[in-house]
Amino acid sequence: MKIAVYGKGGIGKSTTSCNISIALARRGEKVLQIGCDPKHDSTFTLTGFLIPTIIDTLQSKDYHYEDIWSEDVIHKGYGGVDCVEAGGPPAGAGCGGYVVGETVKLLKELNAFYEYDIILFDVLGDVVCGGFAAPLNYADYCIIITDNGFDALFAANRITASIREKARTHPLRLAGLVGNRTSKRDLINKYVEACPMPVIEVLPLIEDIRVSRVKGKTLFEMVGSEPSLNYVCEYYLDIADQILSQPEGIVPKDIPDRELFSLLSDLYLNPINEGRHKNNKENLLGFTTI
């Protein structure tokens, strides 16, 4: 099974991805996490350091694939999760999608791409071009990380549009949303009411999730010294169980941008009377709803 994890930049995709990877490993799966961000920090929480990237390794070998071994690019992380960082071109140059393709190509050359029960692609930020959407070419499911905020849900809707387009030619389905560090879910509920999709889990708003990233540890590793965090790990284990149940998934239908702006902005402006959005003709930016 191959899973692509998307969401707005800074929403907590990598932290969530690492904890889901550990949860899947705890369920007995052989897991590979592939970081698809040029910052190459997706697997930092699993390894505790910035591992060498695929691109760095290819460049050091003058792109001679036959001179590269699995141990050059696949690094063991906490809990037995294997880790790869695709890396990327210099800032402002090249295409990240090309790098993802080269990463998959190399892993296939090494006979490693099909050796895992689960491969999880942790993808940078919003989908703004075909390059950003490249991991969807290889995925069975997409999971979108969000919170209860306007910007995160707007990004989720853009990702939803990409899933719909890719599903025309690939066996791709949306597994659902995961709310990260969220105390309320009124905007999430409003969005999935207008754009039906599963909500897999909503993680609690606790500082330890954010701090785990800074410490370079997953919540599962932190439990060793902080047993009180064990209940948080249960959330990730629940996500893993839902993934392993091989859900049917959906091909979602995104909401037009102006309609979504009107829907969510009205809920911000009128939190008491949630139904009023149906009568509003303009949103915060002056767009007329369609």
Image (spheres, grey):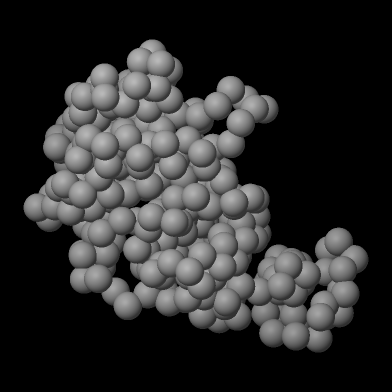
Quadrant position of residue 77:
top left
Image quadrant holding the N terminus, namely bottom left
* Residue 123 horizontal/vertical position (percent): 46, 45
Q: From the viewer's perspective, is 22 left or right of 177?
A: left
Q: From the viewer's perspective, is 239 left or right of 192?
A: left
State whether residue 180 is above or below residue 264.
above
State whether residue 3 is above or below residue 67.
below
Image quadrant holding the C terminus, namely bottom right
Residue at the (21%, 24%) spot, across then down: 69
Count of picture labels = 0
Residue at the (83%, 69%) spot, across then down: 283
Using the image as rendered, state which of residue 225 and residue 148 is in the foreground. Answer: 148
As drawn, which residue projects farthest toward the top? 60
Using the image as rendered, state which of residue 225 and residue 105 is in the foreground. Answer: 105
Q: Is residue 22 visible?
A: no
Residue at the (15%, 38%) spot, across then down: 79
* Residue 220 horizontal/vertical position (percent): 21, 41
Residue at the (69%, 84%) spot, across then down: 275
* Residue 179 horizontal/vertical position (percent): 45, 59
State whether residue 270 is above or below residue 63.
below
Quadrant position of residue 90:
top right
Quadrant position of residue 149:
bottom right
State whether residue 69 is above or below residue 147.
above
Using the image as rendered, state which of residue 13 and residue 278 is in the foreground. Answer: 13
Q: Is residue 120 visible?
A: yes
* Residue 85 horizontal/vertical position (percent): 37, 31
